[in-house]
Image: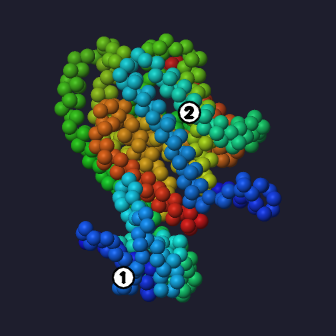
Amino acid sequence: MPEEPAPPADPESGNLPKDRWVPEPAPSTWRWDELRVVGWLYALLLFTSLVGGIAYSMDRDGDFGFWTTLVDAVVIVAFAIRYRAEIVPLLSPSTFDLNARKKLAIAAAVQFVALGAVFYLLEMAGLPFERITDEIERHDYSLWQLLALYSLAPALFEEIAFRGVIFERLRRVLGDREGWLVQAAFFSILHLNPVIFPTHFAMGLIFGWLRMRTGSLLPGMILHAAWNAANIVLELYR
Amino acid sequence: MSKIEWRVDNGTHIVLRKPPLLRRKIELNGQPVDGEWRSKSFAFTLADGRPADIELKADLLSRHTELRVGGKLIPDTRYVPEDLRCPHCNAEIQLIDEFCAKCGHALGDPDRFIYQRSVTGATSAIRLLAALFAIFGVAMFFLMRPTTQTALANLSRYQDQEVLEPINGVTYTAGELRKRVVWEQRGVLIVNLILSVTMLVLAWWSKTKPLPAILIATAIYAAVQVIGAIIDPSTIFQGIIIKAVIIAVLVRGIKGALSARTENG
């Protein structure tokens, strides 16, 4: 069950001076406020994708992948600072304990075997995926730049946004199970490619499961970065 | 003449009438109520001493009139079924009842009927979107057929491994480009069918879990508009009023589902 906000301090008990005491908002009000935060973050990320996407369709040689990632990062960091009290503990190295490592191993096995097989089948069916090698040709990226831009940055910032800020707000309003489903749906939808909605929804569920079972964002970040890096390296070297 | 009715309970029937060009009149159990409108609000007292207040409100979608009795929002007769029964024991109940007099089942506040209407509206919008995605996908599949066949005919003179001139800065072999051309037509159909099926699943899910279902449907609808705008920026302003109405109906559904959920704990 989601935790209810702490009851307000009683002005009569002397916990707070009377002029600083404010009545507790009605449940529907604070729940709506939590959903509004989710809505704002979702809308801002959607807006940067829109601007970056239109700019890219107008000038295919522009370095819009980098700029979109940078703006997304600034937006997500701003939200993370606003909600630092709940995000910082999720990033503590102490959360990456033995339990977190075991859960990461299970999640990695499921993701690489099951989703790897699904992507292999989709490719065999002739589904044309965006090629990362096109980015190398256009911008002369090195492997390290590619890994930083398409593996590390998305893993870091998407995990903070979806499994951090968004999941935390949704679980308070919807509870663990529904919050888990909705954050995974938002994660897949924001990749803006309906063909990969189901596979990215499954990924969102796996990263969300890691977050719930370990109380840490680090295992999800590691798996997310490893998955993206494996895709880049596979395309480059097979 | 416009008329709004509220049946608060068996002994309390309130009617608001607005004759053309005349002032609004309020009747309580068939008798006119004396009083004055103050800033779109009319306060009066029921026969049993409960305070009541009628307020005229407006939002993005509509203008509406709210009645509150003892601070509780009372839905008018358009929202409430005539034969009101306890969902647990089927005994007759009053709109204002918090608990069933027969079995003690908690009924919630009367405004639950307004929230249910918002949720029903959002669910209908989701079903409509499912139908539109399916129709659009099938129509586009057949409309794109001649273009696809022409492109494939042009490519037929190249071997699969032959490298073609770059398109938008990307180099393709003839085989790769053939695959892309075929998938462009199939892709429109597949993408729209995926969206249609997703919306149907969400409409079905919203019967039991309206809040998460409507949240996801709203996120998908907004993302589809962005995808369309990236492919063709001129679509941003096409049908913008309809888009705004759909978003407003979905957001109202979220608010309704949230309020209903808060009431039910």
Relative height, residue B1 to residue A80 (above, below)? below
Q: Residue at x 34, y 75 (%)?
A: B25
Looking at the picture, which amino acid does disc 1 mark? Pro
Relative height, residue A67 to residue B95 (above, below)? above
The chain letter under disc 1 is: B
Q: Residue at x 28, y 17 (%)?
A: B159
Which numbered marker is on residue A41? none
Q: Secondary structure at mark 1?
A: strand
Between A159 and A115, the one nearer to me in the picture:
A159
Q: Residue at x 43, y 67 (%)?
A: B38
Circle 1 residue: B32
Q: Are marks 1 and 2 in contact (CB under 8 Å)?
A: no
Circle 2 residue: A75
Between A90 and B242, the one nearer to me in the picture:
B242
Can residue B50 be spotted in the picture? yes
Relative height, residue A118 to residue A233 (above, below)? below
Can residue B197 be spotted in the picture? no
Q: Looking at the rendering, in which quadrant would you find the N terminus of chain A? A: bottom right
Between A78 and A144, the one nearer to me in the picture:
A78
Q: Position of residue A54 (x, y in %)?
A: 38, 27
Q: How is the image coloured?
A: rainbow
Q: Position of residue B208 (x, y in %)?
A: 48, 63
Looking at the rendered image, the disc whose residue lies closer to the viewer, 1 or 2, is 1
Q: Residue at x 48, y 57 (%)?
A: B255
